[in-house]
Image: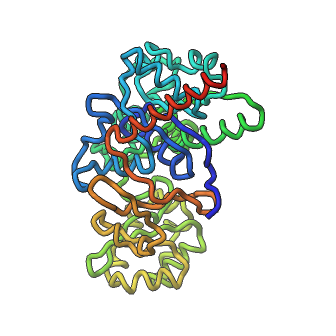
């Protein structure tokens, strides 16, 4: 393999938990050198979320492949000075510390720009800077609730959070893409633009479809389990052997094929209650009853065979315990071998890498494992700079 897309780029991460570490791990996957700054008193608290991966946290293993861990006390003058020496050599700073903590240490984009004009700063916060909730503490589930996502999940009168850290992940994705765009702009113009991402802003962007629907229709979608609020049929059905299958019909041609070729119920295709998507949504109860009765006559294997033959989209309802063994994850190429303190583990290969070139063999760092080496590197660089001045 020749070069990786981000070879030669150095990123400093003042990061913890999920959002910022997810952004910097994606940069590391593309070849950037990521120096993760961790507190002296235990480092990133995501290290302690669990101990299931050979004594390490599953979240930390997910988020920190391929990074270097350096412990610095930023409350100490020397620690802050060391950070500035790192920033002088870095291309990007990604931080998700509390806004007040960054301000106290002079680490906001406005404060850093005169000292490090080449540095792209990416700040990840809970709520947008300058807004009414700028100082409010924000964790993933709290933002899911605040952004209205919980009003769409679960069942009526039983709101539920999404089962993954979706607000953190959304923010991490926008931070990652924002940094890439800022690097492109800096390399083209010499101007280092700051990137600001909030969990609330990222998740409300992902909520735009139901937001616009509600604003313009006057009716908000309600939580419907596996069903879709504006498309029918779209959701889980139960076959005659008790197995569930997700199906999705997108147009009238597919509806006619589902009724006739899959369910052996041609009368459904001509029933005026089901003549269009809007009619099927309006008569969802009758539609669900008809689908339940028809699917109960077919074993799951027959049902999916007919769905494939008719060109109707379907999927399994995969249990999480089975996901690792999913046919799509069977090829070895879908995984990386990642060193940890307890030995190698399999981690998922990142999607979307240009040319499918990703950094391989990047380890999950032990706390402070690279402190001495990085400080020695800085000292060596300082000595070389003094010699050049003499």
Which colour scheme appears in the figure?
rainbow
Q: Residue furthest right?
A: 189
Viewer-closest of 17 and 261: 17
Q: Which residue sits at x=43%, y=66%?
A: 335
Q: Position of residue 247 (x, y in %)?
A: 44, 69
Snapshot quadrant of residue 242: bottom left
Q: Which residue sits at x=55%, y=26%?
A: 383
Viewer-closest of 330 and 133: 330
Snapshot quadrant of residue 225: bottom left
Above or below residue 42? Residue 66 is: below
Q: Position of residue 99 (x, y in %)?
A: 44, 20
What quarter of the picture does the N terminus occupy?
A: bottom right
Above or below residue 201? Residue 358 is: below
Q: Which residue sits at x=29%, y=52%?
A: 341
- Count of numbered labels shown in the rendering: 0
Q: Which residue sits at x=45%, y=50%?
A: 66
- Left or right? Give the position of 116 relative to 249: right
What quarter of the picture does the C terminus occupy?
A: top right
Q: Position of residue 266 (x, y in %)?
A: 50, 82
């Amino acid at each position: 393999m020749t070069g990786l897309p981000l070879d030669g780029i150095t990123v400093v991460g003042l990061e913890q938990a999920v959002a910022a570490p997810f952004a910097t791990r994606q940069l590391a996957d593309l070849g950037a050198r990521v120096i993760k700054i961790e507190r002296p008193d235990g480092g990133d608290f995501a290290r302690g979320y669990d101990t299931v991966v050979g004594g390490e946290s599953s979240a930390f293993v997910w988020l920190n492949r391929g990074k270097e861990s350096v412990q610095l006390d930023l409350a100490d003058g020397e620690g802050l000075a060391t950070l500035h020496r790192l920033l002088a050599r870095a291309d990007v700073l990604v931080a998700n510390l509390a806004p007040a903590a960054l301000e106290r240490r002079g680490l906001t984009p406005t404060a850093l720009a005169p000292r490090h004009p080449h540095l792209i700063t990416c700040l990840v916060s809970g709520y947008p800077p300058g807004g009414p909730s700028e100082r409010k503490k924000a964790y993933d589930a709290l933002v899911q609730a605040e952004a209205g996502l919980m009003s769409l999940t679960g069942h009526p009168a039983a709101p539920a959070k999404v089962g993954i850290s979706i607000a953190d992940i959304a923010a991490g994705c926008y931070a990652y893409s924002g940094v890439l765009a800022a690097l492109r702009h800096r390399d083209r113009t010499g101007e280092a633009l700051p990137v600001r991402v909030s969990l609330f802003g990222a998740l409300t962007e992902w909520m735009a479809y139901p937001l616009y629907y509600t604003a313009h229709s006057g009716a908000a979608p309600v939580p419907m389990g596996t069903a879709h609020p504006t498309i029918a049929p779209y959701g889980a059905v139960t076959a005659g052997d008790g197995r569930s299958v997700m199906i999705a019909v997108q147009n009238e041609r597919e509806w006619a094929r589902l009724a006739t070729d899959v369910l052996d119920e041609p009368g459904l295709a001509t029933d005026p209650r089901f003549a269009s998507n809007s009619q099927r949504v309006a008569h969802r109860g009758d539609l669900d009853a008809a689908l339940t009765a028809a699917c109960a006559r077919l074993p799951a294997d027959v049902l999916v065979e007919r769905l494939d033959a008719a060109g109707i989209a379907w999927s399994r309802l995969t249990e999480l315990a089975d996901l690792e063994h999913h046919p799509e994850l069977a090829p070895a190429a879908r995984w990386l071998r990642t060193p940890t303190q307890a030995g190698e583990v399999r981690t998922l290969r990142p999607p979307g890498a240009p040319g499918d070139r990703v950094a391989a063999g990047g380890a999950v760092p032990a706390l402070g494992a690279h402190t001495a080496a990085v400080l020695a590197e800085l000292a060596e660089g300082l000595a070389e700079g003094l010699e050049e001045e003499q």
